[in-house]
Each structure stands twice: as C-alpha cells, then as structure tokens.
Amino acid sequence: MSLWVDQYRPRTLDDLHYHPELSARLRSLAASGDFPHMLFYGPSGAGKKTRIACTLRELFGPGVEKLKIDQRVFMTPSKRKLDVNIVQSNFHIEITPSDVGIYDRVVIQEILKEIAQTQQVDLSAKQRFKVVIINEADSLSRDAQAALRRTMEKYMSNMRVILCANSTSKLIAPIKSRCLLIRVAAPSPEEMGVALARVAKKEKFDLPDEAATQIVSDAAGNLRKAILILEALKMQSPDLTSNISVAKPDWETYCIKVADLILQEQSAQRVMLVRGKLYELLSHCIPPTTILKTIASHLVDRVDESLKADIMHWAAFYEVRMCTGSKKIFHLEAWVVKVMSLYKHFFYGIDMPDDFEI
Amino acid sequence: MLPKSTKIAPARPTARSKAKAKTSTLTFETPPSSGSKKPVKLLSQPIFSLPSSQETSREGSVQIENRKGKQRAQSPVDDQLWVDKYEPQTAEDLAVHKRKVEDVRKWLGEAFDSSPGSTKRRKYRRILALTGPAGTGKTVTIRVLAKEMNVQVVEWQNSVDGGAIGDQDFDRESFSSKFQAFLSRATTYSTLTFDSPTTSTAPPTPSLLQPLSNNHIILIEDFPNVAHAGTRDAFHTALRSFLASELSCPLVLVISDAGLRGEVADEAGTAQGRRLRDEVLSIRNVVPPELVQVGLVTEIEFNPVAITLLRRAINSIVEAHFTASNPHLPPSKEAIDMVVQSANGDIRSALMTLQFACIVDLPGSGGAKRGKGGKLSKRAKAEATRGILASITQREQSLVLFHLLGKLLYNKRFGDDPEEKEEWPPELPGSLPPHLAHHERRPSKVDPNALYGDSPIDTSLLSLYLHQNYTQYCDEMDECEAISDWLSIADTFGGTGDLWPHQSTLAPYAFQTLTRGVLHSLPTPVARRNQKIFKPEFFDHLRKTRDAEGVVADVVAWIEGTSGVRWGEDEVSTELGGVLKFVDGAPRSHVAFTHLPYSLNPSRMEQLDEQDAAALGDTAAEERPEGTHGVGQGTGEVQIAEDREREWLSDDDIGEF
Amino acid sequence: MFLKPQPAKAAAAPKHTIDPQTQPWVEKYRPKTIDDISAQEHTVEVLRKTLVSANLPHMLFYGPPGTGKTSTILALSRQLFGPEHFRTRVLELNASDERGISIVREKIKTFARQTPRATSGSEYPCPPYKIIILDEADSMTQDAQAALRRIMETYARITRFCLVCNYVTRIIEPLASRCSKFRFQPLDIASTRFRLEHIASSENVPISPEAIAALIATSEGDLRRSITYLQSAARLSASATSPAPITPREIQEIAGVVPDVVVSSFAATLGVDMDHGMDMDLDDGPASKGSKGFDHVRGKVQEVMKDGYSAAQLLSQLHDLIMLHPTLTSRQKSRCALILAEVDKSLSDGGDEELQLLELGLRIHKALK
C-alpha cells in the first residue's frame, strides 16, 4: 500500500488543477518538437516532480510510467567502485545527486554520455531524444555543474535535461541560461483545499471544512505535507474532528517544547538540557536548519515585539555558521544561548549593546 | 623536567627487547627442519588462515587453538612478551568485570545447550559480537571460557598471500569463497582433521556433524575489508548463510572500537561524511543491521578495564614475575600506579608499558642504580617516572587531556588569590579604551602556545570536550554566550565545511581562537563546584544519527519501490513522521527517526578523568550501559561520587602540572 | 568537440550532426570574422593588425561573461588558418574538459610540441604556429597554471596560447606577464540591441522593442545570455497554440527575474517609499510602520518564498531599486548597501534563503525607520 500522496498524484497535465497557464505552456512545448532543457524550481511540495512526471507522459505517452530500477557500477577517478540505483524507463532516466555524493560529476557525465550516444531504439517512440531528470539539482557540486554545462550543449540532438531544484540560487549562471526556467509556485490555500477534497473523494469520505482549513494553514503551501497530514489525521481520528496536532510528526511538537524550555529559564543548566534536546532532534535526522527555523518561529510568536527581530537576526547569523562549520550542534546551541541571553537581559531591563545597528 | 640521560635511556633497551621478541616468534614459527632460508615469508604466513581453497593443505588450514601452549613450553622465559606469557588461564584471572564474563559465559552456555527445550533459544545464540576499546580482554575472555567449557576455538584470519593484494576482483572473489569455505569447514571438517587424521580426506557424513558442531567456537577478529562494498556484501552473505545453516557452532565476532577522532566529527557534518560512514570498522558495517535488530546477533559491550581490576591484575603478574629467582627487583608501587593510570583502561597497553618500564629500571623502583636516585624526593621521583612512562607509552592521552581541559576551564589568572605573592608578568602599556573596557582581564597564567604543543588531541576533538563541559564553569548567561560563540567561530575554521573544501588553511588558527576565546570568556577565578569533566556526547548521537539515516534511506527505497517516486531524504525525515506508523508494509524500523517522545530527563553523560571511564570504580563503570547509574547533570546538581577509591588530582595539581 | 566543425563553411561537412533547429543560436550566430565582433573596437583594431603581420603574441582575454572573448579568438583563428587547417592548428580546452596538471603535461604538451607542417597555396595567412585556446582559464588549478608556464616558454616558437577568463586576478602572475592582455568591455545597449534585432529578424521572431529592452536589462551586458533568452522566448511563443509576440514579462520569467511588481511591493513592506515618482498600484500600500512591523515583513517574506522566487535574484533587484531610489538619503542607501552585501555573502555561503531574506527585510526595515 502506498501513501495517498503517491497514490493520488496527478498523472497527466490535464489532471493538474492549479497553475493552468503553466500546464498549457508545458503541453504546447511538448507538442512543438522543439523541447528545450528545463529547470523546474519552486518551494518544497509545490508539485515540481509531479509536473515533470506529467510532462514526460505528455512527451512519451504512458510507456514512461513503466519503471525499472537498475543497479549500476561506476568507477571513480580513484578507482573506487560506486554502486548506484538508477530509476529509468525506456524514455528517461532519473538521477539524484545525493545518492552518489562527491562523485556526482563522474556519474552524471557517464550517464549523460551513455544516454546521448545510444539512439532511441523504440521506433514507435514519440520523440527522438531521451530525457535525463536530475533531482535536487541545487545540491550538485560546482564541478558537476560545470561539466553539465558543456554536455548539455554537446548532446542536444538526442538528449534533454530536466533539472529540479528548490531554488535557482545555488545553480551556476551558465546552467540557468541554458535551461528554460519553469517556476512552480506553491498552490494557494484554495487550490490546496481543492486538492485535499479530491483526495477525500477518492478515499470516499467527507472532509469537514474546519479540518481542511486547519491542514491547509498548517502546511503553508506544501501540498505534499498537507496530504500527508490528512492521511495521518484520518488514521488517527476517522471522523477528522481531532486537532491536527495529533497527526503531525513528533519532532514538530518537540520543537515547541524546546522553545518553551528556552523561555522558561535561562541558566547554564538549562543550556545543558536544551542541548540534549537538540541532540535528540539531530539524531532523528531532522535537518539542523529546519530545527532552527521551527524553534525560532515558535519563539517569535511568544516574545515581545522588540525581541523578535533580534531572535531572527541571530537565527540567520548562526544558520550561516552552520553551513560553513561542521558541528551543527555548536551553532544551534550558540543561537539558543544567544536567545536566552537576550531574553534574560530584556527581562531585567538591561540594555544590550545594539549588535546590528550600523 | 627530567635529566637528559634518563630520557634517552629507555630507547635502547626497548629496541633490543623488541628485536628479541621478534626472534622468539621466529624460532617458534619456523619448524627447525625447514631452516631459516625464508624467515620473512614464514612470518607473514597467517596462522589460522585458509590458503585459497587448496585441497591439499586442508589438514593444516584449520587449526585448533593451541599456539599459546606450545609457545610456553618451548620458549625461554625471558624473551617473551608478558602479554602472552601471563595470559589469563582461568576466569578468575581475567581482569574483566565479573558480570561481563558471566554474560559471555551464559551466552556460550545457551549456545551449547542442546537440551530439547532450548532449540528455539539457540536460534538466537548463533552469533555473538563483542565490542569495546582495544585491550579490554575481549578475545582472552572467549579463549578462557572456551577452555573452561572444554571447547575449541577456531580462528579466521585474512590471508595475506601476495597476489591478491591490489587486485580487487581477485581479492573479492577469493575472499567470499574462502570465507564461505572456512565457515563450512570449521563447522564440519575441523574435528575430523584433528581427532581422526586418517579420515580427514573422506567426505563428511551427516551422522558425524551433530556431535562435532558442539565443541567449537569460531572466532573472527581479523575482519575482511568491510569498507569495500562488495567485500562487505560478501561478508554479510556469509553471515546470513551461516545463520541459515542448520548445524553449526557459535560464531564470535570481536570488534575493537577505532577510538575517538575529532575528524570524525568534522566529516560528520559534511556531505562527504555521510558517505564515509561505512568506512570505519564497527558493528554497524560488520554485521547486517537487520540481524542486530531482530536479535539474531547478540552484542556484548566491553568497557575499559576498571582501575582496581587493572591494578590487581598487574600486581599479580609482578608477583609472579619477580620471584626470588629473578635477579631484577620489582617496580615500585608508584611506578605501577603510574602505569595503571596511564593505561586508559587498556590492559594490554599497561602490560607492555610495565614490561618495558622494568627493563629501564625506573627511578622509583628499588633497583635504581644511579647514586642520586635514592636522594630524590618522592615527588621528584614521581615526576621522573611519569616522564619515562610518557616516553615509552603513547596511551597517556587521557592524563594530558585531563590537565589540558583543567587548565583551560579553570582559567587561572594572576591575582586570583590576593594573598598570592607571585610576580605578575610585565604589563602591556596602557589599558583598553573605554568602549572596550569590558574586555579588560588580568594576565592569564595559561599559555595557549605551550598548550598547543602539548595537546594530545586535535582541535576538533578538543572543541567537543570544551563544548561538553563549559557550562559548569560559567556563572552567567553572558559567559555561556561568549563561549558558545567562540566554539561556533572556531568550528567554522575547522576542517571541511560543505562549501569551502580548502578551509584547512585556517585550521592552525582554530586552536588559538578556541583556547583564547574560552579563556577570555570564562569568569576568573572559576568558582569551584566540584565540577567533573565529561566525555562528549557527540559521538553517541552521531552514531544514532547514522543509524537513523540508514533507516531514512530504507524508507526512501521502500517508497521508490512501491510507487516509483523518488523522495528526498529530508522530505521523508521531516514530513512522514505522522503517517508512517499507519502504512502497511513500511519498514518497521522507521521509529528511528519518526518516534521522538519528549521527556525532561537529562541525557546521560560519561565522565572523563585521568583514568578515563575506568575511574568510576568497578560497579559504576560496568553498570553504566544498563542505564541505572547515569550521572545526573542538567538539573543543576552534579553528582558527587563519594565512595570512590581513587584520588582526584587536587585543583592545585592541575595548575602546576 | 562541438565547436570545431564550425557552421560557417563546415555546414557542408557531413560530420555536422547538430540539428540546425535545435542548435543554440549562440553558436549559430557566433561572429565569423573579427570584424563581426560587437563593441570591442580597440581589441579588434589590434587583432586586425596581427592578421596582416601574421604574428601573434600569447594572449590573455579577460572580461565579464558574454562579451565575445571566445568568439573573438575563434574568429581570429579561423581567419588565420581557414576551415581547412583550423582543426589541426587549433586546440580548444574548456573547464568541462579535464584540465588538471596531468592533462596540461600530456595533452597540451603533446599538441604544443608538434611542429606545424608548412602550408602553401592557401587563401589564408596560415602562419607557422598553432594556437591553444584555454577557455575559462581562471578555473585551472595553480599547479596546472604553473606547469603551463614552462610549456609556453619552451614551445613559443611554434605554439601560441590564448587564455580566456573572467577574472584576470585568478591567473598566476608568471602566466599573465607572458601574455598581452586584452580587456573586454561589457556590451553597450546599442550594440546588443543591434545584434538581437538582427537575430530576431533572421529567425522570424516577432518581438517588440520593449521585449528587446527587457532582454537587455535582464542580461546585464551578457550577449550570450540575452541570445539564449531570446531563443527560449522564441521557442515558447512558437509552441503556443496562438502565436503571440513576446512580452517583456515573458522574458523576465524565462530569465528567472522577479517581476517588478513583486520587488516593489517587497520594498514597500520594508519601508522604502514606493509612491514617489512611480505610479504603481501596490497591493500592500505604503508599509505600515510600527508595532506590526515584524509580522508584516515576515508575512511578506513567506509570500515571496512560496512563490518560489530566488532570494539571490530578489536581492540584486532590490539593490538596484534602492540604489537608484530618488528620495532615500545617501546615509540610508549606504546602510542598505552594507546590509545587502552581508546578506549576499551569507547566501553564497549557503545560508537558508528564507532566513536570509527575513534578515534582509528586518534590517532594512530598521535602517529606514
């Protein structure tokens, strides 16, 4: 049994109910015979992957849904063997850079070359080219991006690349300028409501408005998250009357409690306690940036207006430290301690030197 | 400081005795008849390896553990290593906590228990993994218990015959076949070979198998290269097929921890680190994780040898060695204490140190031949002994680390004590301008440059220790704030951020920034609250994170398998928490990242001191894994362990050392 | 290598497998002679002389992307050797080729040491040396550059090097000093417009002057980028069911540029006075300063992020808007500039986009209060 999100994922461009102008554009591009390299970008859960899958179907027909998973072996320059699972159909191949880590350049070059050099054997295929989808393209190393740039030009005749990324910021300009940029914005609350109702209808239950509103506002534009919450809520409380907090992942509630800890007491002992909690969150694979942002957003909802900007400022500050450093806990903790200190000083009315006045 | 002569002295005897040790091995390995034409080759021949499936050499290929006995019988007393010479013979001799020995004995007993009602349990007594730091008596426990139960130990060793090295494909192929062959032979043929040589070439008959499997233990200490994915898979396959086979003896894996390294922490934070996680030898990659989860593999963790046990063991060996007939005089009590303290819970290291220390004639020992020796004060003697020991052992880390941390965290400055008559160093001209006045400090007694030279660990690991402990030494939030910020800054100087792989150019500054920053931020003098130094929890959580990452990857693969959609790891770990428990067929292990109950209990911490964890005394050190003796912190009270028989270094010692 | 069989005369060559329809216009309309190079008069002037004298120094071309550096050297080589000898006399290597020290030692050296055969009867000057073009030379490692230096000296008689890079400072000094340096200026609007209109008319693309202006504005003097955008836009408009002329908004979407309305509404939220001099209908109206400041800015940031706009892009557009703002004081502008710079650094260090945008918003909001 698969998740509702995957089970009821729209399969064709016609099934997609939001961003109709975007769907129309993709449809006409697929029909035009002059299909460019593309870069889909937009926030998490806006439906980029779904849209790519629909576009592929538009290009190649239902055959593209017949997937096989191949295990492939690549040889790195240091003669290490690298086993990679690769999902592909007769018409496309999918790569996720995080699967291959620091060797992404080698793997991507190999795969692209191979695809480009093999002609489409299926004579009934609608297109002469194959498509290479690169997921999480913003995590591609610079090396890999540089390599990609020439390859994209070189093998234009029988290969197209579709990149999928949350943001274009981490992609080098030459890649961006070689792709047609497709921005997939998050669906509006109404559009999300429609999507939820559609899932409910297929699962044959009624979705009360209050539950829908709650879910939509909690998911903040992330449709995947909304549907996941809906599924969890339905399982927890079949009549959908419970508060949606029961359906949320543990770590979110946990973060709220950590925010409480920070505001209740500011002391060295409390730092140790919070540290333990942060460690717990990290060892449950919650990305440190997510931890930081979640705790911060709960904090600013609860403190005086004059502290809010400072808390966010330091959150941004230590988040960058996290990217440049390696021990995430140090920076998370430094931020927590900073917030505690700010809060304590605020409480005792001591003026802090204004750290970010210029 | 030591006189020069004593410092140089240990080098020569050490070298000589090493050479001696080698020769002794040689003589014993080489059969007298074959001559000494190719001694090197003979030496490198593995003792219990299976030559790559050569049928002819089967008799010699699997040998019963009887080397130790032979050695004792043949070698002259003096050129043996004490480690081998005084290897424990009975369970009473073991310097391992009784409960651990009991655990292992119970497990082995259950494994060999063939009574009708135990069949089900025996299924779960097939593979035992002993883990723990080096020199904690893992292997010897098995040997002793095997002897006690009258079963034989069959050991696997990697073959090192030349051709295979460097040729991956060949190595990999030959490995899996060899290892498989070893497992099957060890369970079927071995006793045939030794009990009844005449039938050794005959094909095994099923009727023979039943009784034979009951008196062997297969021991694997020398693991194949599990960092190589292919070899690891082959090894895992071999283990699984071992479990699947009907009749065989228990398999014991002895896995020594690689130890703490700061770079591990650095790598951990980076993208590369995630991929490197498979490359360190640990139970996670030696044994297929699912086997551990379902209990098919039992793990028993050995702790560093407790200090009392260590001392008792050493004393009894000294007694045995320095009998009346021995021309040398035994080492003094102080010397033994030093050895015990610097051993870090590693009994093998302690014995090595002691053996060489006795060759040198420590100044503290009764046999000091230099005329001045007797006149040295007790303290000076201790100093000299410590110096010598420092030069012959590299395991004194924890001692130095303890003092390094003490120096930093106690932040001593001139004028801390108004009574003190010490001369202040010359002051810098002028004082800080008003807007920087809050940075004014009295001159520090700590010299970071000197510390840098002495530091036994890299900056990265040092920062983890400081991070773990700094809060106890702060009075105010502001101090915590400053220190945590310095830690954060120094971390960005460190090794390998995701973004700038060449940050290492900054690395030399990390130590200076870190230590000076911490010294600048701490209060002075630091209030004494009976603070204890704890080991970083970091690695523990890192291990958990690695496990959870593995589970996330499983879930990603599961979704991809069922629906063909590739989810990102972060999407799975942050968004699936609510749903996963209701979905049929999802990997059950998902709780590793979805289940996060909130409790106010502070996390457990492990204490560091001169003897490392060993210091807590037998009971506490051994029971910690059960979770009952966690050292309470976080809620503000620092547990004071009263009933401890070891001596804390007083704070003054820290200052002066 | 894709570049070598050049379209100009190689069009007849059967080896040329690129479908002309899908061929990037950047290649299709690459200048054939150095006289076709847009807007680099001084450089072209000097190079034209080398054509006559057939003597060429080692060269270092540097300047921002899309200013014709590669085009110039390719055109020059072609004019020197003609299509016949181009392939044997010119070696082009770029960053996507492996260019570590071993390649420098082997591939480059092997090519550099070959003595070119004498040619006769060619209509081209065909001077007795070869040219090695190192595109994107600033991405070569220091070691590789150092190794190059010996090779340059040893084979100077028979081989000329042309290093092409964006940042001359990343070329090690010993290398740079061996080359005559040519700086390429960002293209002026008139030449860009001329070039774009030329391509648009050859490809029969219906495009309005406003859209051309938008192309020029979004590509910031990078001709390559503007041609690529033009091709994408042409593709889109051609594939649409009812072909419509390209609009400036489409160009912006293709280029990933944040629409002006979004930028100005974001700026207004931060307290930048957007009513002055600009008659725009803003959905938020003037920023409400005061107690609701934080939530207001935060809401706006979340909105922008949900729409998927790139923070780095918004940052650079906001920068232009603030710096050119008619009523902000110099002091305010300089404060903002510092904030913008810091946030830009954080973003390129990998900082979270939402946090950084919020940081930017809150600080500018404060600085302008």
Image (spheres, grey):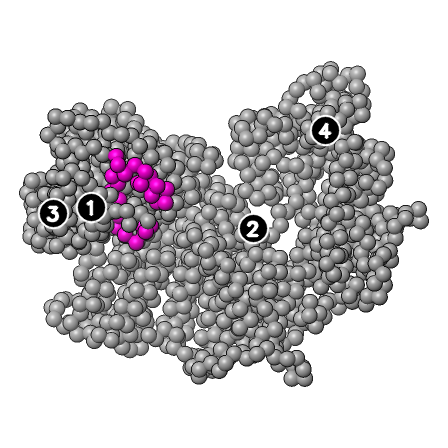
CB under 8 Å between discs 3 and 4: no
Q: Is residue C133 magenta?
A: no
Q: Disc 2 marks which residue?
A: B543
Mark 4 or mark 2, whichever is nearer to me: 4
Q: Which residues are magenta?
A: C144-173
Mark 2 or mark 1, whichever is nearer to me: 1
Q: Position of residue C109 (x, y in %)?
A: 33, 35
Picture quarter containing residue C296? Answer: bottom left
The residue drawn where x is 12% and y is 68% is C278
Q: Position of residue B318 (x, y in %)?
A: 85, 51
Q: Disc 1 or 3, which lies upstream in sequence?
A: 3
Q: Which mark is residue B39?
A: 4
- Tag 3: residue type? Glu
Dot 2, how many residues are within 10 Å of its Cα: few (below 14), some (14-19), or many (20+)? some
Mark 4 vs mark 1, CA separation in Å: 68 Å
Mark 2 vs mark 3, CA separation in Å: 66 Å
For label 4, the SS is helix
Mark 1 vs mark 3, CA separation in Å: 14 Å
- Tag 2: residue type? Arg
Question: Disc 4 sits on a residue from what chain?
Answer: B
